Image: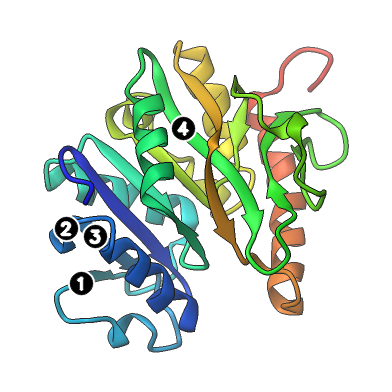
């Protein structure tokens, strides 16, 4: 059981049966009072079907991933947490991997620690880590949709990581202003990474930790929504953080 100055947080929007699977996996890792669920005005009833001992905060409207993450981080901080394991409702992670991420995030000037993310149903990589290219969509996720291989087993400091699962040092995120809420969802990891780097914080990709993610694949509506926000927010990323000839 993982205890101490860490909490687990799940931000939910119409997660369906995935939410119960995710929370069940967290209950095997964390004391129940250290599991926080924030429902972003879902139209399904997945959160209401959770066990009564799981605390759920419900937003009246869908305030987006970024505002929802800020609220979740503030909630964890109020409860005395120094670190937050953020995990999507369609993702799972094991105890050893969480401990690896916590160790990494406990290092000096490390703000975020990301695992290797694999697709739940196929075993291929959903993504390793990201880089800013300033080309089409401004960023790219390295390893997305490719077979896992030794090249993805090197621990390194990166511009940003995969947002489906990570451990955050809460005070570091708020020291740079938290998530940029105008992004709503997607590309926010890259924008936050730019501000963290400018303030001297680091983001680590730790492949000894592994998480499994379902993602939007096969859901046409979710895929279209993701494409829209990736395009929209690439413009915001350029506007807000690019300079000189790049801008």
In terms of sequence position, does the residue under pointer 1 or pointer 4 come before the other? 1
Q: Are marks 3 and 1 in contact (CB under 8 Å)?
A: yes
Judge whether 238 appears above or below 75 on screen: above
Reply above or below: 139 against 184: above
Decide: is 174 above or below 165: above
Closest to the camera, between mark 4 and mark 2, is: 2
Give the residue number, with chain letter if any, for mark 3.
35
Q: Quadrant of residue 149?
A: top right
Question: In the image as oriented, which residue stretches furthest toward the right?
Answer: 136
For the residues bearing labels 3 and 2, Cβ distance under 8 angstroms: yes
- Label 1 and label 4: CA atoms lie apart by 25 Å
The kind of secondary structure element at disc 4 is: strand
Left or right, residue 165 beside residue 238: left
Q: Quadrant of residue 187?
A: top right
| SS class, disc 1 | loop
As measured in the structure, the alpha-carbon distance from the residue carrying label 3 to the one carrying label 4 is 19 Å
Give the label on residue 242, or none. Answer: none
What's the distance in space between the residues labelled 4 and 2, CA to CA?
Answer: 22 Å
Proximity of marks 4 and 2: CB atoms separated by less than 8 Å: no
The image shows residue 227, relative to residue 17, as above or below, that is above
Mark 2 or 1, closer to the camera: 2
Residue for badge 4: 113
Q: Which residue is mark 1?
A: 54
First in sequence, mark 3 or 1: give its number: 3
Q: Which of the numbered marks, if any, corresponds to residue 31?
A: 2
Q: Position of residue 129 (x, y in %)?
A: 66, 35
């Amino acid at each position: 059981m993982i205890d101490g100055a860490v909490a687990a947080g799940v931000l939910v929007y119409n997660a369906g049966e995935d939410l119960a699977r995710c929370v069940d996996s967290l209950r095997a890792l964390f004391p129940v009072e250290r599991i926080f669920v924030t429902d972003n005005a879902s139209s399904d009833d997945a959160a209401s079907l959770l066990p009564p001992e799981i605390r759920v905060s419900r937003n009246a409207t869908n305030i987006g991933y970024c505002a929802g993450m800020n609220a979740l981080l503030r909630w964890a901080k109020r409860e005395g947490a120094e670190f937050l394991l953020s995990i999507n409702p369609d993702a799972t992670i094991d105890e050893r991997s969480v401990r690896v991420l916590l160790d990494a995030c406990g290092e000096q000037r490390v703000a975020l620690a990301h695992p290797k993310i694999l697709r739940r149903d196929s075993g291929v990589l959903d993504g390793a880590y990201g880089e800013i290219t300033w080309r089409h969509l401004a960023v790219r996720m390295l390893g997305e949709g490719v077979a896992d291989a030794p090249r993805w087993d090197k621990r390194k400091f990166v511009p940003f990581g995969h947002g489906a699962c990570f451990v955050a040092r809460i005070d570091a995120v708020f020291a740079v202003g938290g998530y940029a809420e105008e992004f709503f969802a997607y590309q926010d990891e890259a924008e936050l990474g730019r501000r963290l780097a400018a303030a001297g914080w680091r983001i680590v990709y730790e492949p000894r930790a592994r998480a499994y993610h379902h993602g939007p694949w096969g859901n046409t509506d979710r895929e279209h929504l993701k494409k829209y926000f990736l395009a929209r927010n690439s413009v915001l990323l350029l506007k807000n953080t690019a300079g000189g000839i790049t801008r």
